[in-house]
Image: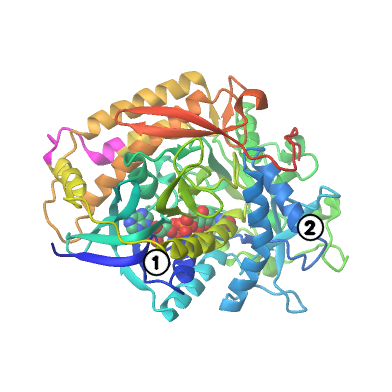
Amino acid sequence: MSNIHEFDVVVVGGGGAGLMAAWYASKSVRTAVISKLYPIRSHTGAAQGGIGAALGNYEEDHPEWHTFDTIKGSDYLGDQDAISFMCEEAVQAVYDLEHMGLPFNRTPEGRIAQRPFGGHTNNASGKPVRRSCYAADRTGHMILQTLYQQCIKNKNIFFDEYQVMDLLIVDGAVAGVVAVEMATGELHTFRSKAVIFATGGHGRIWEITSNAYAYTGDGPAILARRGIPMEDMEFFQFHPTGIYKLGILITEAVRGEGGILFNNKGERFMEKYAPRIKDLASRDVVSRAMYLETRAGNDVNGQRFFNLDVRPETVNKYAEIDGRTRPDGSAYQVTAAEIMSKIPDIADFCLTYLGVDPTKQPIPVQPTAHYAMGGIPTNKYGQVVIDEKNTVLPGLYAAGECACVSVHGANRLGTNSLVDLVVFGKHAGINAAEFAKGADLKPLPEDPTGEVMRQIEALHAGSGKERAAALGKEMRVEMFDHVGVFRTDEGLQHAVAKVQELRERFKQVRVADSGKVFNMEMLQTWELGNMLDLALVTAQSALARTESRGAHARDDFPQRDDATWLKHTLAWLDGEQVRLGYKPVVVTQYQPKERTY
Ligand SMILES: Cc1cc2nc3c(=O)[nH]c(=O)nc-3n(C[C@H](O)[C@H](O)[C@H](O)COP(=O)(O)OP(=O)(O)OC[C@H]3O[C@@H](n4cnc5c(N)ncnc54)[C@H](O)[C@@H]3O)c2cc1C
């Protein structure tokens, strides 16, 4: 057989989590990174706002405060042992990035600059704390560049523009993965002792989204088809400030720098919903507030958007009202130039896509699908766990947005995904390398590429009565309308039936291009299949959960119900059906309380 490669550790994905994992694994064992995108094009490069760590460079802050804020932000669904581990490790992780050469903004004394972000507070006063470490509004871009350079220095082996399509499991342990080389259409089998999935999110399932085109959930879908359950898929974050109609993200840092949200009456409506931290409440709270304002007829021009105002005169007026000061105690008063220097890329997006200069006009925004809290279940060592008892699948690891540790629970705080990538990417890399040192390569199954061949042939064999583009559109609209910010039993039943119908119709799609070189029609159709699988798992998990918690808001069950639902969902994709199970949430020091901001 040709095209067989052998490694100790294979990392699937070259984003922040994948590069961090590869960097650590490659220190001691032969490591390859397989990525469908050229690594520095990964979505991590789009991250704007920053990475959270309690450095306390301006004011008092502690990892325990970060821990509590994250638990509260998760609406108590996050596992507290993993959250405390992440927030403790975050501090060193940021210094590690600094030492690798990441060009953070600086305080006048030369320390890493920090800014406020939603849900991050001084636990004593309840007021926002400066915890987000940033490099202007290009933090993720800088992380990717820095890590990629370090990986090249470490002589990591990259297989760029190879798309992984299957995971090989032999006798209950990992044997490798199968990937297609996009430039030639050839299949490659990668034998390895350990595999780390770091494939990112799946937000392209929704109509209005901040996510890149590559966010089609390949990793979770591959694993779901191999019998691994998906955890907490009903929890998907809608970010309150996407550019109207386009969904492109306007970072929360705009509100961190003093931006304010207004409704059609010119009211700062967040005062009603989060009296203490107002515009900087957690994302689920702000997105829901926008929907409630829309229902009350308070959206601008009746067009379901709101104004995000970061003009200096507005920022300065409300800074005075809120009593906001600079770190040295002086009044917080900004100029247009200062705003531009803090959010240059955002200003650029506004000009390019809207023709709006944010220092002169408000930005029209609406909630946009943003982040997958759920995904491949792992423990805090990055190992994938496959049942209610947290049984480990030997050799299989996951990290980053595709994984569910769970540190974000029902709602992720801003800046905590980048923390998650670097902390759990690192530990997945270290632990996978340790595992590989004590393991042998598994024998390959008889026909390692057989399942991928079968899937590709099926895509070419459909009757052609259905078109992938049309099915994709129907899926995205259905998911946005019925599995969005607010949900009901009726809407979710509708979504489950609709996605099942779309999965059936998908069998009639035929890929017309039979070529081998960059057959994007074939790959994108295959990706649509992944999204339909994950859409079904998401809608079924959401239908079952009859409570409101974090990003999962049920109109018909408005209360959080800890007695019944303080537990993680596990959803197995069983052919056409989804089977559900549950496992307990790890509660250590913080008993669930009502959430107020
Ligand atoms: C616009 C935007 C702004 C954000 N801002 C912030 C922020 O300021 N702070 C914060 O904490 N979080 C932010 N987030 C969230 C955060 O950026 C992401 O959750 C995180 O970067 C995901 O990193 P990752 O390494 O898991 O995935 P990615 O960086 O997306 O990498 C995924 C990798 O997997 C590869 N891949 C996928 N499928 C396959 C396959 N089948 N075969 C081979 N390779 C595959 C891709 O090529 C890619 O290299 C933001 C997200 C968005 C969309």
Seen in the image, is 149 located left or right of residue 58?
Answer: left
How many tags in the picture? 2
- In the displayed structure, would residue 45 be above or below residue 454? below
Asked whether 544 or 307 is in front, the reply is: 544
Residue at image position (62%, 50%) is 82
Query: Looking at the rendered structure, which numbered label has been put on residue 39?
Result: 1
Front: mark 2 or 1: 1
Distance between the alpha carbons at the discs numbered 2 and 1:
40 Å
Residue at image position (49%, 69%) is 24
Asked whether 561 or 135 is in front, the reply is: 561
Q: Position of residue 546 (x, y in %)?
A: 56, 22
- Find out if the beta carbon at label 1 lies less than 8 Å from the nearest ligand 1 atom: yes
Seen in the image, is 319 located left or right of residue 569?
Answer: right
Q: Which residues are magenta?
A: 461-471
Which residue is label 2 attached to? 316
Q: On the image, which quarter does residue 112 sit in?
A: bottom right
- In the displayed structure, would residue 37 be above or below residue 370? below
Q: How many other residues sit within 10 Å of disc 2, few (<14), some (14-19) or many (≥20)?
A: many
